[in-house]
Amino acid sequence: GVDLTRARVEEVRSDGEPAAAESDDTLSIRFGTIEVNLAARTVRREGFDVHLAPKEFDLLVALLRREGAAASRSELAQEVWGSETAASGRTIDTHVCALRRKLEEDQRRPRHIRVVSKVGYRLER
C-alpha cells in the first residue's frame, strides 16, 4: 500500500512549495462527497461531520491506502485488528456495512465501498 502521509508530502514538494509549509491538520483525502482528515481522524460527508468508531476509521484508511486495489478480509484483519485471526470475516463485513450506512448515498447500491467477489473489498473514488 501507499503511505498516504508520504504521498501528500511528496505532492507538496512537487508543486514547488516547501513540505514544511504543509501542516498535519490539512492532510486530507477526498472521494465523492466525502473528506477524510487523516491527522485529525475526522470524516465529513457533504460538509457534515460523520462519526466513525475507531475501527471503522481504521478500516476506511486501510481501503484508501490501496488506491482502488482489492483487499482480502484477512489483509484487512491484519492491518486494522493486528492479526488475521483477531477479526472474523463477519466482523469485517459488519464494519463495512456500518461504513456504507454512514458514507454511501444508497448503501444497497454502494458507489465507493465495493465487494470484490471471493476476495474482499475495494474503495473506488
Image (cartoon, rainbow, N blue to C red):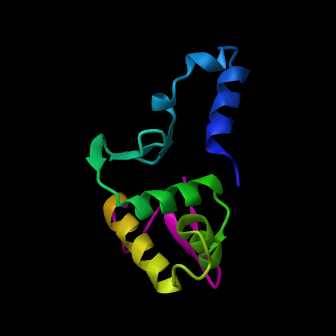
Residue 70 within the segment the image draws in magenta: no
Residue closest to the eye, 11 or 39? 39
Q: Is residue 61 left or right of residue 5?
A: left
| Residue in the picture at 45% in, 80% down | 91
Residue closest to the eye, 8 or 30? 8
| Residue in the picture at 57% in, 60% down | 63
Q: Is residue 15 left or right of residue 111?
A: right
Which percent across, then down, holds residue 47? 30, 40
Quadrant of the drawing holding the N terminus: bottom right
Residue closest to the eye, 116 or 43? 43
Q: Is residue 78 above or below residue 54?
A: below
- The stretch in magenta equals 104-125
Q: Is residue 28 left or right of residue 14?
A: left
- Magenta span: helix, strand or loop, mainly? loop
Which percent across, then down, holds residue 26? 47, 29
Task: State the count of labels.
Answer: 0
| Residue in the picture at 39% in, 65% down | 99
Q: Is residue 66 left or right of residue 104?
A: right
